[in-house]
Amino acid sequence: MRLPDWERSAPWVVGLCSVALLVLIWELAGLRDDIALTTVMPPPSQFLSMVIESDFRIGLGSQSATLDEALMATFGRVFTGMFLAFIAAIATGALISLSRFATWSLSPILYVLAPIAPIAWIPTAIVVFGISNVTAVFIVFMGVYFILTI
């Protein structure tokens, strides 16, 4: 049975209206001075004007980058973390499958650390690696390694 045209487009229209309503509420909340949230999240009109004035650059001062540069840096961190996790998971899995001693010694460690959410590793990563690309790669690694290994 074929759906009428209006039923096929209804999810898009409803979704677009809900996003527009959220942006409108956000903008109206930004007009009030007594709401503390707007100091952390300025309304879209203020935010978008700042983005346009900065030529769509992300970051502050000498640390700012174009949108393309920021996306490529992010993809680089994510793919590096995933690649390292893949290699480590294959090596760990092979070691566990080939040696009983490795199974006995590594399995408890894996089962203790695996339930820890990747976001919970952020403070440890910052303390160990500081604020750097290595920290981001480590967080991605921790999010992928245990899933692949187990």
Image (cartoon, rainbow, N blue to C red):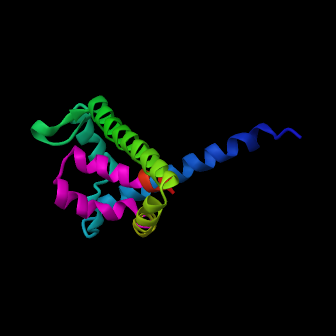
Residue 45 screen position, x and y as percent: 31, 46
Of helix, strand and loop, which mostly describes the magenta segment? helix
Which of the 4 quarters of the picture holds residue 86?
A: top left
Q: Is residue 106 left or right of residue 54?
A: right
- Choose between 91 and 143: the one closer to the eye: 91
Q: Residue at x 43, y 69 (%)?
A: 108
In the rendered image, residue 138 lying in the magenta stretch gets the answer yes
- Choose between 6 and 54: the one closer to the eye: 54
Which of the 4 quarters of the picture holds residue 36?
A: bottom left
- Choose between 114 and 33: the one closer to the eye: 114
Residue 60 screen position, x and y as percent: 15, 42
Residue 101 drawn above or below residue 48 = below
Residue 75 screen position, x and y as percent: 36, 36
Which of the 4 quarters of the picture holds residue 25?
A: bottom left
In the rendered image, residue 124 lying in the magenta stretch gets the answer yes
Q: Residue at x 55, y 46 (%)?
A: 16
Residue 105 screen position, x and y as percent: 41, 65
Asked if residue 21 can be seen in this view, the reply is no
Residue 84 drawn above or below residue 39 = above
- Choose between 137 and 98: the one closer to the eye: 98
Magenta segment range? 114-143
